[in-house]
Amino acid sequence: MLNKKLTTLCLTSLLSVGGVVQAADDPITINWARWDVSSGVELNAIADAYMKAHPNVKVNSVDLGSADYNSMLMTQLSGGAKNIDIVTVKDVPGYTDLIRSNNVVDMTSAPTDELKNNATYQGLIDEFTVDGKLYALPIRLDFWVLYYNKALFDKANTPYPSNDMTLEEFDALAEKVTSGFGANKNYGAYYHTWRSTVQLPSLFDGKQTLISKDYSFLKPYYERVLKLQQEGTVPRYASLKATSTHYSGPWFNSTVAMLPMGSWFISNQIAKVKTGESKANDWGIVKMPHPKGVKAGTTAATVTSLAINVNSDKQEAALDFIKFAASHQGALAVAKAGGFPANQNQEILKIAANRDGFPKDEKSLAALEIGKTYLEMPVDSLTPRIEVILNRTHDAIMTESESIDDALKMLNKDVAQVLN
């Protein structure tokens, strides 16, 4: 756990202003650290909505790039930068690094009654609370679903996937819709090179996390994916890694029948169908396949959240913006722009389902109603170091350069050194 003696700046005095920027008539510019600003339409929509409601405030987005965002951000904040007020927290490792380095403000008192009364949002607050304190408010929640190409299922005369499908049923279905050879090959499924594609389902029973003293629970998940790989049901990891293949390529080319991927891909798929770049123009989504005994709809999530730079001179204004972004107003802006906000309800889901280009079949609509959701990595100060080890282990197993048993044995040893 993070050191409880961390020195943090409390926002008690700021929170007492009730979400109203003092001296509201005075012009003010707040700088928002982000990545890929030009394509980040959902976050741009939040800024536009806020500036419309607060004409005296200019929200200036500072693009730090996506590839090295966390390291670029840490370099600036650790150097005492005052030209960043709002910090976009990209992932859990980044969140823990920001807390450990004392670069963000304690926001424990920030959640409003609206957020506390939202079951989905309260669950995220609990997940992001470290040693009883909260340092960021979630604004976007992307969850894993299963995309499927209806045309390839029709070609194989095989029923579409369902919203309640075990991993074993998924594997059997993938085998049925695999066809062809060489350039004419259609794969039953596609596992991207991220370790999360294989490891995440192991979390769905809630019995373990990816910070553990014993990783033997991962063995059956690697066994099944390696079997699919060896049978030619999914592309080989080594080939995908060597060619730096992006998961969208095979999907857009309509050579993949099923793709486990995050909800963030929905907007891209809709856009590429409209331009004709995606040949997978007859498609749908269902809930993620799950281990036996796990309730359908259980999934993993990636959360984007906002924090305040401890060195900012505009913390009051930054807080007001963050509370707006996390509110129902901010959620509406995200949903109308095509994203999935952390603050969800039936109205938000209906907006997503009514988007032009979103599949209108009942299965796809039902897939948006998720159940128990787990973070991909627990919020812990050791997460960044352990993630490096997990990635190294994943590569060794998937390239078959090491046996599953040997790789997991080494994983246990390496993580034990970090834990100790």
Image (tube, rainbow, N blue to C red):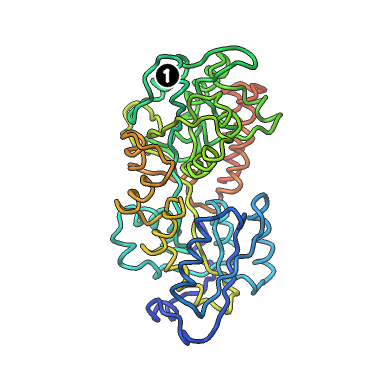
Residue 282 placed where, x, y %? 45, 30
Looking at the picture, tell me which residue is in the foreground, 54 or 354. 354
Badge count: 1
Amino acid under disc 1: Asp
Above or below residue 219? Residue 361 is below
- Is 170 left, or right, of 273 in this rendering? left
- Identify the residue under disc 1: 154
Looking at the picture, tell me which residue is in the foreground, 279 or 4. 279
Above or below residue 152? Residue 7 is below
Residue 50 placed where, x, y %? 46, 70
Above or below residue 82? Residue 66 is above
Looking at the picture, tell me which residue is in the foreground, 195 or 366. 366
The residue at the point 34 percent across, 57 percent down is 122
Residue 308 placed where, x, y %? 53, 69
Question: Looking at the image, can residue 182 be seen?
Answer: yes
Residue 108 placed where, x, y %? 41, 67
Looking at the picture, tell me which residue is in the foreground, 384 or 410. 384
Element assignment for label 1: helix
The residue at the point 44 percent across, 33 percent down is 146
Q: Based on the displayed image, in which of its 4 quarters is residue 183 positioned?
A: top right
Question: Looking at the image, can residue 211 be seen?
Answer: no
The residue at the point 58 percent across, 57 percent down is 97
- Is 92 left, or right, of 330 in this rendering? right
Crowd tier of the residue under label 1, counting other residues whose Cα lies within 10 Å: few below 14, some 14–19, many 20 or above: few
